[in-house]
Image (cartoon, grey):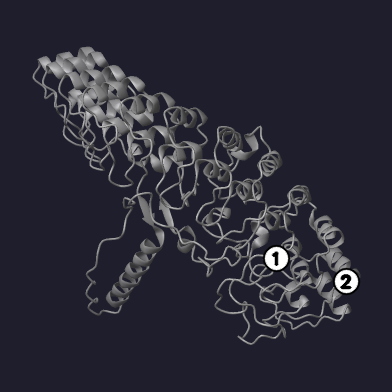
C-alpha cells in the first residue's frame, strides 16, 4: 500500500537519496575562490580554457564542494567536461553534503553523453555517495536508459542496494515511473523479486519514546540546576532491516470470525506495524505507473508477490491508492483478487474505502477521481469474479485516515458492507447484498482502557459484558453517526451527501435492522444521531420504536450525546429539547460549554 506500508510513503520518499544530490547556486556557500568552477557554472567554455591556461586550479571548489567538473556534469556541457578532464580534473571529487561525485551529478541529471565520457575517463561506476546511493540509482530514477546502459557496461551492479532502505536501481526506476530504465536494468540482470528492507514501526516507536523520556529528564535536571542523569547505554535506534525469505510472518487469526486486536488503543505505530518491504512492481503499482508495472510483468515479475512487511499484493496496493485502472488491468492479467494483507484488507474493501476515505491527509487525494473505472464498476467486477463479499478486517487500517484517526471507531472486524453503511452508500450496499453480503456483521470489540470518556468504570447500561472479539459496532450504528459524540469524526467523515436518513431507512425498512441495537459501548442509533443534532433521524427512530431513554455503559444518555460531550463539539439545543420532551434525562455534562 502506500501503505503498504506504506504509512507512509510517497514516491518522493523513495527518492530521498536522489533529492539529496547537490543543486548548485551562484549564491551558494561561500568558500575559497574557484574561478574555474564559476566559469563552468556559467557554461563559459572560453573562460574555462583561459583560466586553466593561466594556471587556475581545475579542482577548485566553493564551499559546497562543487568543482568545475560537477558543474559541467550538472549542465550537461560535454565540451566543458572534456577540457576539464584533459586538464586533470578529479573524477572522484565529492560535494560537501552527500559526497556526490561528478558521475552522480551527471547521472541524476540524465546527461548520458557526459556519463559515458566520465566513465571512459576512469570514473568509478560502483562509487556511492555518503548515503550509499550509486550513479546507477540516480540514472535509473532520472529515466535515462542510455546512462543506465553506459553504467552497466562499465561494471555498475544492477542489484546494488542503498543502505537506508535496501532499494535497488530497479526500485528507483519503478517508483519514478521510468519504464525504459527498468527494462534496461532487467535486461542486465536486475532481480525483479527483490524486496526493500522492512522497518518495525512498533520497535522504533518504543525506542523513540524511551529516548524522549531520557532527554526530557536531562533537560529538567539542567533547568533545576542539578546534574543530569547519565544516559543509558543501549543499541542505536532500530532502522529498516532485510527481511529473511519472504519477510516477517504476519500475525494470523486462529479463527477468522474472531478478529484479533492490534493497535486497538489508538497507537498509530501499532496500527502500521511493519513498513517497507516493497518490490519494484509494488512500487510501480503504488504510484500508478502503468507502463513500468506492465514492463516488469513482461520481464517476469510475479503479479501476486506480496510485500515483505505486510503481505500486500500489487493489485491491492494499486487499489488502496486509487489507481483503479491499473488495478483492473492487473486483475485482467491474472492477479488474484482474493489475497488479503496481514490486516485483512482485500481489493474489494480497498476500492470502497478509497472512494470514501478522508482525503485531506491522503498522499494521493485526486488520483481516484481521474480513473475510467469507478469504484462501483470495480466492486461489481470483483464480485462477479466470485470474491468473498464478507471478509473481515483483522485490525483497523492505518491508511484509512493517515497520521491520526478522527473517525472515532476501531474498524477491526469491519466488512465491505459495514464500510458502505458507514459511508451511507446505498448503491454499494445493494450491490454487495446482490452477491451475498451479510448486512448483520458488526465490527469486533477490541481491548479498551475504560468504557468511555469522562465517566467512571461502572457499567450503567445493565447490559451483559461483551468479550474481546465480540460484536462492537453494527452497520446501523455506522449509518447513525458513530464516533461523532466520541471525538472529531465530523472533521474527517466522508459520506453520501444528505444520505443519513435514506441509509437509515434502507437498513431498518428493507433489512430489518434493530433501532434499539446497542454497540459495545451501550450506545444506540439514537445516541449517535443525537451527537450530530439530527432531529429528523431521531424522530424516525422513535416512530420505529426506538427508546431514547436507554443509557450507555458510561452513563451517557441520548441528551448527553447532544450536549457537547467532547471539547470543540458544540451542543445542539433543539436536539436537547426534543430528547428531553421524549423523556431522556439531561445530566448537564457539557464539556465544550
Question: Of the numbered discs in the image, which one, if any, rests on residue 542?
Answer: 2
Res 536 visible: yes
Q: Position of residue 545 (x, y in %)?
A: 88, 73
Q: Is residue 484 left or right of residue 308?
A: right
Rendering coords of residue 453 (x, y %): 62, 77
Q: Residue at x 76, y 64 (%)?
A: 476
Q: Mark 1 vs mark 2: which is more N-terminal? A: 1
Establish if 546 lies above or below 95.
below
Nearest the camera: 65 or 198?
Answer: 198
Residue 382 x/y as whole percent = 65, 42
How far is disc 1 from disc 2 in space, using C-alphas?
Answer: 18 Å
Residue 417 drawn above or below residue 203: above
Numbered-mark total: 2
Most distant residue in the left direction: 55
- Residue at the extreme bottom: 458
**Is residue 534 left or right of 332 when viewed as pictured?**
right
Q: Toward the viewer: 435 or 54?
A: 435
Residue 328: name its quadrant: top right
Q: On residue 482, which mark appears?
A: 1
Category of crowding for the residue at label 2, using alpha-carbon neighbours closer than 10 angstroms: few (below 14), some (14–19), many (at least 20): some
Residue 244 placement, left or right of 510: left
Evaluate whether residue 72 shows in this view: no
Element at badge 2?
A: helix
Q: Residue at x 25, y 80 (%)?
A: 226
Q: Residue 417 location, x and y as percent?
A: 70, 55
Name the outermost residue toward the right. 543
Amino acid at each position: 500500500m502506500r501503505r503498504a506500508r506504506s504509512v507512509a510513503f510517497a514516491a518522493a520518499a523513495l527518492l530521498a537519496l536522489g533529492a539529496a544530490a547537490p543543486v548548485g547556486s551562484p549564491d551558494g556557500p561561500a568558500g575559497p575562490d574557484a574561478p574555474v568552477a564559476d566559469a563552468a557554472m556559467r557554461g563559459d567554455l572560453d573562460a574555462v580554457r583561459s583560466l586553466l591556461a593561466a594556471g587556475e586550479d581545475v579542482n577548485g571548489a566553493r564551499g559546497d564542494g562543487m568543482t568545475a567538473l560537477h558543474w559541467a556534469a550538472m549542465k550537461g556541457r560535454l565540451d566543458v567536461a572534456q577540457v576539464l578532464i584533459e586538464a586533470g580534473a578529479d573524477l572522484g571529487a565529492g560535494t560537501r553534503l552527500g559526497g556526490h561525485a561528478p558521475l552522480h551529478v551527471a547521472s541524476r541529471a540524465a546527461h548520458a553523453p557526459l556519463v559515458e565520457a566520465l566513465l571512459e575517463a576512469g570514473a568509478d561506476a560502483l562509487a556511492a555517495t555518503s548515503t550509499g546511493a550509486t550513479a546507477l540509482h540516480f540514472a535509473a530514477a532520472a529515466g535515462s536508459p542510455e546512462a543506465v546502459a553506459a553504467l552497466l557496461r562499465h561494471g555498475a551492479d544492477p542489484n546494488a542496494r542503498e543502505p537506508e532502505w535496501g532499494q535497488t536501481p530497479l526500485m528507483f526506476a519503478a517508483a519514478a515511473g521510468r519504464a525504459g530504465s527498468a527494462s534496461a536494468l532487467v535486461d542486465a540482470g536486475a532481480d525483479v523479486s527483490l524486496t526493500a528492507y522492512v522497518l518495525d514501526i512498533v520497535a522504533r516507536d518504543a525506542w523513540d519514546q524511551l529516548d524522549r523520556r531520557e532527554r526530557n529528564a536531562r533537560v529538567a535536571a539542567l533547568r533545576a540546576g542539578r546534574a543530569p542523569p547519565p544516559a543509558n547505554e543501549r543499541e542505536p535506534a532500530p532502522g529498516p532491516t532485510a527481511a529473511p525469505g519472504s519477510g516477517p510472518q504476519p500475525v494470523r487469526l486462529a479463527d477468522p470470525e474472531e478478529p484479533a486486536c492490534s493497535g486497538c488503543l489508538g497507537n498509530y505505530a501499532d496500527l502500521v506495524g511493519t513498513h517497507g518491504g516493497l518490490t519494484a512492481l509494488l512500487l510501480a503499482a503504488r504510484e500508478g505507473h502503468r507502463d513500468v508495472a506492465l514492463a516488469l510483468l513482461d520481464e517476469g515479475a510475479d503479479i501476486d508477490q506480496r510485500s515483505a512487511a505486510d503481505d500486500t499484493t500489487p493489485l491491492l496496493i494499486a487499489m488502496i491508492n486509487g489507481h483503479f485502472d491499473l488495478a483492473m488491468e492487473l486483475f485482467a492479467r491474472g492477479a488474484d483478487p482474493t489475497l488479503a494483507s496481514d490486516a485483512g484488507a482485500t481489493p474489494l474493501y480497498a476500492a470502497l474505502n478509497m472512494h470514501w476515505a478522508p482525503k485531506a491527509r491522503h498522499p494521493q487525494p485526486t488520483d481516484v477521481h481521474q480513473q475510467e473505472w469507478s469504484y462501483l464498476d470495480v466492486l461489481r467486477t470483483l464480485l462477479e469474479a466470485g470474491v468473498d463479499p464478507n471478509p473481515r478486517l483483522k485490525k483497523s487500517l492505518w491508511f484509512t485516515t493517515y497520521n491520526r484517526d478522527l473517525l472515532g471507531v476501531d474498524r477491526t472486524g469491519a466488512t465491505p458492507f459495514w464500510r458502505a453503511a458507514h459511508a451511507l452508500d446505498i448503491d454499494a450496499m445493494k450491490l454487495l447484498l446482490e452477491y451475498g453480503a451479510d448486512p448483520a456483521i458488526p465490527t469486533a470489540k477490541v481491548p479498551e482502557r475504560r468504557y468511555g470518556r469522562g465517566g467512571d468504570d461502572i457499567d450503567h447500561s445493565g447490559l451483559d459484558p461483551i468479550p474481546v472479539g465480540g460484536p462492537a459496532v453494527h452497520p446501523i450504528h455506522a449509518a447513525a453517526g458513530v464516533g461523532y459524540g466520541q471525538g472529531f469524526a465530523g472533521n474527517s467523515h466522508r459520506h453520501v451527501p444528505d444520505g443519513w436518513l435514506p441509509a437509515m431507512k434502507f437498513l431498518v425498512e428493507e433489512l430489518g435492522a434493530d433501532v434499539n441495537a446497542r454497540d459495545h459501548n451501550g450506545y444506540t442509533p439514537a445516541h449517535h444521531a443525537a451527537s450530530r443534532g439530527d432531529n429528523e433521524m431521531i424522530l424516525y427512530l422513535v416512530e420505529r420504536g426506538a427508546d431514547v431513554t436507554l443509557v450507555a455503559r458510561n452513563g451517557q444518555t441520548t441528551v448527553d450525546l447532544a450536549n457537547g460531550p467532547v471539547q470543540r463539539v458544540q451542543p445542539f439545543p433543539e436536539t436537547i429539547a426534543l430528547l428531553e420532551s421524549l423523556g431522556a434525562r439531561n445530566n448537564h455534562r457539557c464539556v465544550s460549554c
